[in-house]
Image (cartoon, helix red, strand yellow):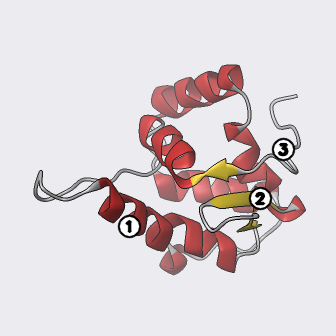
Amino acid sequence: AFFKSIEDRPFTNVTIMKMMDEADVWRYDPKKESQSKQSASNAFRRNVLEPLTDKGWITNGRSKNRWLVTPSGNAILDIFCDEEEIRSYMEIVKSMRENRMMICRSVCESMNLPFDEEQL
């Protein structure tokens, strides 16, 4: 199956950041080279993790930099559980040239959730 459960498999900010960056789903683009990885992590938390937490798709794991997928979030986050699946997902994203909004819309539709462009 393309999606599979990753319950009880916490993942770090950096892991998700790298995978989403490689898949062109989210990118941290510092304006100055002096901007640190810490500010990348803060931007990632603010722009990606907090909205996903607000939607109830992920929840804090045992430490503040680890996150667990909730049952309602499996559709969007299970793609990060397996290296081979990550690669096929990235190929799909690249071949379709999907942008973040289109991906979010299709995920919302697959989960029967309302899609609000203004929330992005």
Residue found 72% across the figure and 62% down from its top: 108
| Residue designated by label 3 | 6
| Residue designated by label 2 | 68
Judge whether 62 appears above or below 1 on screen.
Answer: below
Q: Is residue 68 left or right of residue 25?
A: right
Q: Nearer the viewer, residue 20 or 60?
A: 60
| Element at label 2 | strand
Residue contact between numbered discs 3 and 2, judged by CB atoms under 8 Å: no
| Element at label 3 | loop
Q: Residues within 10 Å of mark 3 (few under 14, many from 20)?
A: some
Q: Quadrant of residue 40?
A: bottom left
Quadrant of the frame with the N terminus = top right
Give the CA separation, mark 2 to mark 1.
19 Å
Q: Nearer the viewer, residue 65 or 29?
A: 65
Q: Earlier in the sequence, mark 3 or mark 2?
A: 3
| Element at label 1 | helix
Q: Could you say which disc has been placed on residue 43 in the image?
A: 1
Label 1 amino acid?
Ala
Judge whether 54 appears above or below 18 on screen.
Answer: below
Q: Position of residue 22 (x, y in %)?
A: 44, 35
Give the CA separation, mark 1 to mark 3.
25 Å
Label 2 amino acid?
Leu
Residue found 62% across the figure and 68% down from its top: 64
Q: Earlier in the sequence, mark 2 or mark 1?
A: 1
Q: Position of residue 16 (x, y in %)?
A: 56, 47
Q: Could you say which disc has been placed on residue 58 in the image?
A: none
Label 3 amino acid?
Ile
